[in-house]
Image: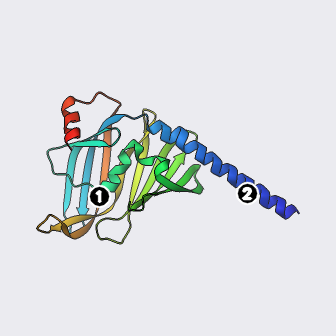
Amino acid sequence: MKKYKLILICFLLLSHSLLAIQAIIPDSIIGKQEEIKNFKVDIELAISTYSGQNSEFFFTYYYEEPDRIYLETDDYVLLPKDALKTLQPGFFQLDKYEYNYLGQKEGLHILELIPLDRQEKYRMVLALDPEKALIRAGELFFQMGNYQEEFKVLVDFAEIEGYSLPVYIEGKLAVPAKFGIGSEIKEYREGTFWLKFKDYSINIVLPESIKKKMSSN
């Protein structure tokens, strides 16, 4: 009888933990992120291919809800699309995902999110701080082009004006190396990349010139 009571207690504790994490995430973390209507941030990007070819880019990233972006730069910037999705506040909305609670690590709750849209070729794991209601770190796993391999991207978040925003991203990617007549990608070259973010401005009045460029994208 004691054995069954112990099992029941463990089950109740686990259920309470799962219910707690379900309540914490959408209300105090996701809800907070959705307060961000727009922002701009300066980004430094470095890409290194295994052939030894290195490239650096500098640009300003503008975002306006729900999903409008504009890159202000003098360079042609090649960016890993799925990695940049993490910049948008609505990216973590739980109604887009099925999710699994993976337990705790160093006081943080670990959550795996898998898109309900099976055409999306990524999944992610987030480390959440329930006391501060913040995202501390993330891992994004995605596929590119014809690759079957899953690329891994690490994302570091920082608390900026009370919100969880990326400050550093690094990982592997496949860089288009050869194009066909119709601009289709014929060949990829594997490489690594990192992005550094600084000077966030949140919920500001965006210049009209930037808003027009966003609308035309």
- For mark 2, give the secondary structure: helix
Judging by the rendered image, the residue that carries numbered circle 1 is: 193
- Please tell me which residue is depicted at 31% across the width and 65% down the height of the picture: 144
State the separation of the CA atoms marked 1 and 2.
43 Å
Q: Which percent across, then down, holds residue 15? A: 69, 53
Vertical position of residue 21 compared to residue 116: above or below: above
Query: Which picture quadrant has residue 105?
Result: bottom right
Vertical position of residue 10 compared to residue 212: above or below: below
Q: Amino acid at mark 1?
A: Phe
Q: Is residue 103 left or right of residue 56?
A: right
Instruction: Judge by depth and name the residue closer to the eye, 118 or 131.
Output: 118
- Please tell me which residue is depicted at 87% across the width and 61% down the height of the picture: 2
Query: Which picture quadrant has residue 140?
Result: bottom left
- Please tell me which residue is depicted at 46% across the width and 34% down the height of the picture: 162
Instruction: Judge by depth and name the residue closer to the eye, 35 or 158.
Output: 35
Judging by the rendered image, the residue that carries numbered circle 2 is: 11
Q: Are marks 1 and 2 in contact (CB under 8 Å)?
A: no
- The extreme right residue here reads 1
The number of callouts visible is: 2
- For mark 1, give the secondary structure: strand
Q: Is residue 101 left or right of residue 212?
A: right
- Please tell me which residue is depicted at 69% across the width and 49% down the height of the picture: 16
Residue 106 visible in rendering = yes
Ranked by sequence position, the earlier of labels 1 and 2 is: 2
Q: Nearer the viewer, mark 1 or mark 2?
A: 2
Quadrant that contains the C terminus: top left
Residue 133 visible in rendering = no
Q: Which percent across, then down, holds residue 181? A: 11, 68
Q: Is residue 46 left or right of residue 85?
A: left
Instruction: Judge by depth and name the residue closer to the eye, 33 or 199.
Output: 33
Q: Which percent across, then down, holds residue 177? A: 18, 67
Q: Amino acid at mark 2?
A: Phe
